[in-house]
Image (spheres, grey):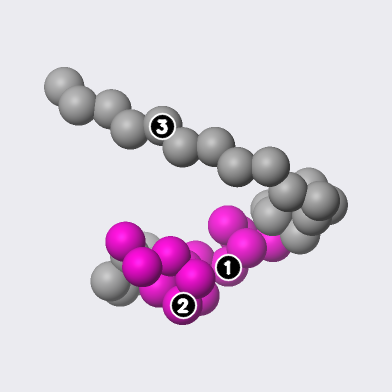
Amino acid sequence: MWTYDYSAETVAEPVAIFDLFRDVATWPRWNPGVEATTSRR
């Protein structure tokens, strides 16, 4: 199985990073590896 790791340093507060990950609908805007997302709610 292939794995991929990436890391970066930032001055952003952890809550700002968490907010980006929590808002799944915006992932394609800031992560070019994501073409689309859907919700199962």
Q: Label 1, on which residue?
A: 23
User: Does residue 1 belong to the magenta stretch?
Assistant: no
Residue type for callout 2:
Arg
Q: Label 2, on which residue?
A: 29
What residue is at 58 percent from the left and 57 percent from the top? Answer: 21
What residue is at 36 percent from the left and 68 percent from the top? Answer: 32
Residue type for callout 1:
Asp
Foreground tag (1 vs 3): 3
Judge from the rendering whether residue 19 lies leftward or rightward of residue 2; answer left or right. right
Q: Compute the Cα span from label 1 to label 3.
A: 22 Å
Q: Compute the Cα span from label 1 to label 2.
A: 11 Å
Q: Nearer the viewer, residue 10 or 18?
A: 10
Give x and y (percent) for residue 19. Answer: 69, 61
Give x and y (percent) for residue 16. Answer: 76, 59
Which numbered circle lies on residue 5?
3
Q: Compute the Cα span from label 3 to label 2.
A: 21 Å
Judge from the rendering whether residue 2 lies leftward or rightward of residue 20; answer left or right. left
Q: Earlier in the sequence, mark 3 or mark 2?
A: 3
Asked which secondary structure carries label 3, the reply is: loop
Q: How many marks?
A: 3
Foreground tag (1 vs 2): 2
Image height of 40 relative to 7, above or below:
below
